[in-house]
Image (cartoon, rainbow, N blue to C red):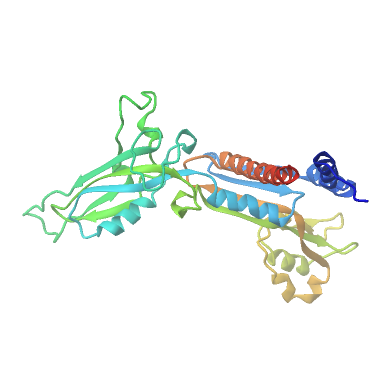
């Protein structure tokens, strides 16, 4: 005799099968409890930051690095409208150089512009102008040519008085650096153009990447073996084998100079000590598998701490999206 199974019974059975195994749930709770972040240093301008990510695995550390590089939005030139360019630099090369100039603008205040769109609405783009004319060559000069250098500081923001906030100053809308060389003009040459600075992500083009550096490494582990003393000339030789600040030499009560490990995180991965087996046998060298040292350097639009916070937010939203997608898929199957 066949047994009929209703949709509700199927749904209950599948919901039970989707429950986490108690051992897996306990492991997940332990992982979350051990995960932490410790900020080590931030520069005064806030554009460089070093922090430790502890209690995680390389895949998650690499996911944070990838999000910092290609997922966080930033502002960069996308459209170049040329009115005049009679310089020696071709239009395509000039557009490429301008496209890589970072601009100081908060991308969180803008919307993504549609593909192939040329809209210059303030919600989608900032408009900057550049107009430079090299002076004529004086007749009484001994130089063959007098060159005029064009820098990023020559850009000026074209404000729409009706749409832009009057409280926004030009200091908040300008290139990050003023000394980026764009072109060199000879006498009577001219450049006249406008650019659209829009919002984008590094996955579309690297010019939209908000960081110039986003890397991590394992925390070095350097220990002297138990009941091991490295003193005298061996201590000085051991100190020279590592980066400055890793090994220090201290004096004991008897006046002997002994080596002591002070700060292993300053080690750059050098293995010069392996050249001296008689010293190396007294050391334990390795790395912490769940301790990662991150170095982040912003291009200047947003502070590094804000970028790290945005990376964590994006990573969390992506995890929630995939979690809900899997759940919705199984609910559709139940129905």
Please say whether residue 131 is visible from this viewpoint: yes
> Residue 33's spot in the image, x, y percent?
81, 42
Residue drawn where x is 13% and y is 52% of the image: 188
* Quadrant in the rendering for residue 267: bottom right
Residue drawn where x is 70% and y is 44% of the image: 332
> Residue 134's spot in the image, x, y percent?
17, 49
In the displayed structure, does residue 242 sit left or right of residue 203? right
In the orientation shown, which residue stands out farthest toward the right?
A: 1
Residue drawn where x is 89% and y is 49% of the image: 23
> Residue 204's spot in the image, x, y percent?
47, 53
In the displayed structure, does residue 210 sit left or right of residue 116? right
In the displayed structure, does residue 323 sit left or right of residue 21? left
Q: 91 or 211, which lies in front?
A: 91
In the orientation shown, which residue stands out farthest toward the left?
A: 139
> Residue 169's spot in the image, x, y percent?
37, 29
Q: 204 or 83, which lies in front?
A: 204
Is the residue 69 above or below the residue 44 in the image?
below
In the orientation shown, which residue stands out farthest toward the front?
A: 1
Please say whether residue 245 is visible from this viewpoint: no
In the displayed structure, does residue 262 sit left or right of residue 199? right
């Amino acid at each position: 005799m066949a047994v009929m199974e209703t949709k509700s019974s199927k749904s209950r059975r599948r919901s039970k099968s989707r429950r986490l195994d108690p051992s897996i749930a306990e492991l997940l709770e332990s992982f979350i409890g051990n995960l932490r972040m410790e900020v080590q240093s931030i520069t005064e301008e806030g554009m460089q930051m070093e922090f430790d990510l502890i209690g995680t695995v390389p895949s998650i550390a690499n996911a944070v690095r990838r999000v910092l590089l290609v997922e966080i939005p930033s502002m960069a030139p996308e459209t170049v409208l040329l009115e005049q360019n009679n310089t020696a630099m071709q239009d395509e090369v000039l557009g490429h150089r301008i496209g890589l100039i970072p601009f100081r603008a908060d991308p969180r205040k803008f919307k993504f512009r549609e593909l192939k769109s040329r809209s210059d609405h303030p919600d989608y783009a900032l408009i900057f102008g550049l107009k430079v004319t090299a002076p004529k060559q004086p007749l009484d000069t001994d130089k063959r040519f007098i060159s005029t250098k064009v820098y990023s500081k020559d850009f000026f923001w074209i404000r729409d008085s009706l749409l832009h906030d009057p409280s926004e100053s030009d200091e908040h809308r300008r290139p990050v650096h003023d000394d980026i060389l764009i072109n060199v003009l000879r006498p009577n040459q001219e450049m006249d153009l406008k650019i659209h600075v829009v919002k984008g992500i590094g996955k579309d083009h690297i010019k939209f990447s908000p960081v110039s550096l986003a890397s991590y490494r394992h925390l070095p582990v350097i220990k002297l073996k138990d009941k091991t003393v490295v003193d005298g000339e061996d201590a000085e030789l051991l100190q020279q084998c590592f980066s400055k600040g890793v090994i220090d030499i201290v004096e004991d009560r008897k006046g002997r100079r002994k080596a002591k490990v002070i700060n292993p995180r300053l080690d750059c991965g050098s293995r010069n000590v392996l050249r001296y087996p008689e010293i190396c046998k007294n050391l334990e060298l390795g790395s912490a598998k769940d301790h990662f040292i991150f170095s982040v350097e912003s291009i200047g639009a947003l502070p590094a701490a804000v970028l790290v916070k945005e990376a964590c937010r994006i990573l969390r939203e992506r995890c929630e999206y995939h979690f809900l997608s899997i759940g919705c898929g199984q609910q559709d199957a139940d129905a």
